Structures are given as C-alpha cells and as structure tokens.
Amino acid sequence: MPHDWDWSCLTGKVVLPSDLSYNIDRTNYNIRYTRSPAALVFCQNVEDVQNAVRCVSRQGIPFRVRSGRHSYEELSLMDDGLIIDISGLTTATIHPSTATARVGAGLTQQAMWNLLGATNEYAFPLGTMASVGIAGVLQGGGIGMLTRAFGLAIDQVSSVQMVTATGDVVEANATTNAELYWALRGGGGGNFGIVTAFTLQLVPVSQVVVYALSWRAEQFPSVMSYWQSWAPTLGDTNLTCQLTFSSDGSLHSEGVYLGTPDRLRELLQPWMARCPPVSPVRLEPMSWYMSTIYFNSFDNQCDHAFKTSGAFVYQPLPDHALASIQQAITSAPTGVSCDIWMQSFGGAMAEVSPAATAFHYRKAQFILEFGGSWQDRSNTAAGQSAAQWTRNLRTALLEYTNGTYVNFVDLDLGSRSTGNFDYLNMYYGDNVARLRAVKSEWDPANVFQFEQSIPPQEDPPSRRTGG
C-alpha cells in the first residue's frame, strides 16, 4: 500500500482511515464485501470534482467515482485508492416556464421526489428506491413505474454536465457534444468522466391510481403466464406494473395507472378472473409523490449483503422456464432470501429506437431481476449459496433472455481483471462499438476504468465484444 500520496491537492471533505467517520463513509448499500480505500473525498461543488480528477491524474492515484452507494458489485469502491464521492452535489432548481429542472448529480431519488412533491405539479420517471442516486439511474437508463407512459428516465434528460479526464467541465446535449450526450444516456456510470449535473424535462403528473394484488405461491405459473402476455402489450400505456415472487411464499403485483380507478379495474378484471387473487384488489388514488413512498416500501432499506443479476425478455417465457423459476424460488437455500422481480415495458419506451441512446434493449417486453440476500455477511456459506442460486437461475433462463441491465451489474458476466469482456455485449448490445468510439474520443488514456468499464478502441479486449 502506498503511503506517499499527497492529499493536499483535494478540496471538499477528505476522509482518511484514521478519521472517526471512515468506517461509515466507506460503507455501501451492499455489504457483501469490505473495501479499504486510502482516502475518500466528498465533493461539495464542481470545482472539488475538478481538483480531485487533476489530483489523481498528477500523482497516478487509482480511484473510483461514487454517488448513491448502490453499485451491486461495489464497483464504486476499491482498496487503497481514492473514492471521489459526488453525493454533496445537490443543488436543484425547477424552471416552471419550461417545465425543466437543473439538478446536481448527487441527488438521491428521494431528494428528487421531495423536490417535485413540494408542488405536486410535475413528476419524473425515476426508479423506486429512495436512497439510490440519480446519477447512476440516469446514466444506466432509468426504469420505473412511469416507464410505459413516458419512457426511460434518460428520455427526459435534455443536457448533462461532465468533468472530463483532463479536469475540464463540458456540457453535452443534442447540439453540443452530441455523441457524448448519446453515450451518457444508457452507457453506464463512470465510463467517460464524472457527471455533475443534469437538465431534466419534467412530466405533467400529479395524481395516479395504485393497485395491489396477491396470490398463493402455487399460482405462479398461471399468474406469470397471463402477466407476461398482458402487461407489456396493453394498448393503454398509462399502466406500468411489477410482479414479484419470493422464497417466503409471497406472490404479488402492483402498478401505477394514469387514469381513473374504474378504468384500472376494467384493465385488471380479465387477469383476476383467470387468476383469482387471495383477496380483493386494492385500488387507491394518490398523489404521484405518495406513490413513490409506497413503492419504496417494497425495498430493503437497510445495508445488507446480496447477490443479484438480471435479464431482458423479448418473448413470453415458455412453461418450462416458468417451472424453472418456481422450482428455484421454492427451493431457496437455507439462510438466504431469494426473489424474482419483473416490470412491464413497451409503450413509450419501445417507441424510441435502440440506437437513439446507448440503452439498447428498447424492444424488450419486460425485465427480470433476481437474487438472494442474507443477514450476516460473515456467513460465507450463505453468501456462496446465494451467489450460486443466482448463477443457476440465470443459466436456466439464458436461452429465453437477452443481455442484462447495466444497473444490475454482475461480475459473473466478466471483468477486466479476468480478461472476459462479455459484459460489454450483455449490457450494451449493438451499441458497444459506438460507445468505445466515444470512450476513445473523451478518455483515450482510459483514466476512468474499473472492473466492468468500457475500454477505448485502442485497448482491444476481445473479438467477442463486437467492438
């Protein structure tokens, strides 16, 4: 471990291993691993970010960039190097005349909800977990309960501010640095520079209707069979819904509808008739802001250990694939909580070309996220069981799925250190070559690199990447 790095070139709040807050400050949401960085710098403004980039470049210090602490594989942390944390970039302003917001990249989704909920005039199609940072959401794509109505979150991003590998500040939009703008919407966080602000187009939503349904675990094949053919293909794109099946025996679905309770009941009635729920459907009109609070309640709010993966689905899963899912859920390993979650796509998301932004999987019908969590991170047996359970289910479904979401980062898909770059195609599909070209333009020296980063064209990983 080097001991001669000079941290005096950093501005902002610098935290060293000797500081009392170090253990808290270095902890991410997934506590599966423990990382021991040499220092962390909590940037309070764009100048702090610039200084950090210039500081590490000048001294050759390895570093990672962090915002919301939710990287599934802790790729925003590292041992020995510097963590550049941008969670302090939280300035936010709404411009009513243009229905836009200029927001710092350090905002969490909760902070964004609070900003818009104060007036309840606008919404924004983010995800559903409060503590997740918007920087990761927006650079990865951004799926949530308004996806079918308004598309991905990146579809409402009109401009992005970024600190480059040389420490300069640039703006990227449809007319200025257009290729970088394309890449920053779906190309994953931390590949091209450090994003510090976004301009967002808000959507005119104040009231929604939320539904909730539940069934017995043994009903999963019929419930899922109907849902996967119905939810993504509804002509009424005002409904986006999710379906969750867990090893505790719970099977439930919820959704957000931009319309009336009566119309939503009509949409749900054929499904309920085919698959009778255990209790009457719950229909509740509420503000969009309160709907974000409701959906956040389904997520684990505590730091915990977990292993997760995912996939996109373009055609309904056949019966034997559904049987594989049911078998996996009902035979979860001891000491591990396992589940599979699905969200419907189609609608406005599918109206955008897969090449229009770096997010390739526009035409998928729905997304899967599955994995296992365990309470005691020192229980290595539980951790290994959860990881193997996740790998087994991904393998069982591989024939029927395509790629995966870059925000469901999974090191089993490959990494720089192993020399397996299959993750590039898994995350970015046909957009890999274009992303590598953007990387070569903006970061030719590969300053921004991590285990699953996008390499420049001059750093060929493998012919299998298609790049």
Image (tube, rainbow, N blue to C red):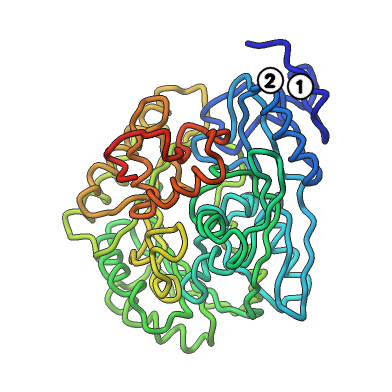
Q: In the rendered view, would you say 431 is above or below 30?
A: below
Q: Where is residue 86? Give x, y as percent.
A: 71, 43
Q: Where is residue 288? Give x, y as percent.
A: 64, 73
Where disc 2 sits, the SS reads loop
Residue type, numbered disc 2:
Ala
Residue bearing the label numbered 1? 16
Q: Where is residue 46? Give x, y as percent.
A: 77, 46
Residue bearing the label numbered 2? 38
Q: Residue at x 37, y 46 (%)?
A: 247
- Quadrant placement of the N terminus: top right
Q: Is residue 445 left or right of residue 95?
A: left
Q: Find residue 100 and report its image quarter.
A: bottom right
Relative depth, front residue between 416 and 305: 416
- Quadrant placement of the C terminus: top left
Relative depth, front residue between 132 and 135: 135
Q: Residue at x 44, y 84 (%)?
A: 265
Q: Where is residue 172? Give x, y as percent.
A: 62, 59
Asked if marks 2 and 1 touch (Cβ < 8 Å), the reply is yes
Q: Is residue 334 left or right of residue 136?
A: left
Q: In the rendered view, would you say 13 is above or below 90?
A: above
The crowding category of the residue bearing disc 2, from other C-alpha atoms within 10 Å (few below 14, some 14 to 19, many at least 20), is many
Q: Which mark is residue 310?
A: none
Residue type, numbered disc 1:
Leu
- Note whether residue 246 is visible: no
| Dot placed on the residue nearer the N-terminal end, 2 or 1 | 1
User: Gap in Å between the C-alphas at discs 2 and 1?
Assistant: 7 Å
Q: Find residue 350 and report its image quarter.
A: bottom left
Relative depth, front residue between 304 and 311: 311
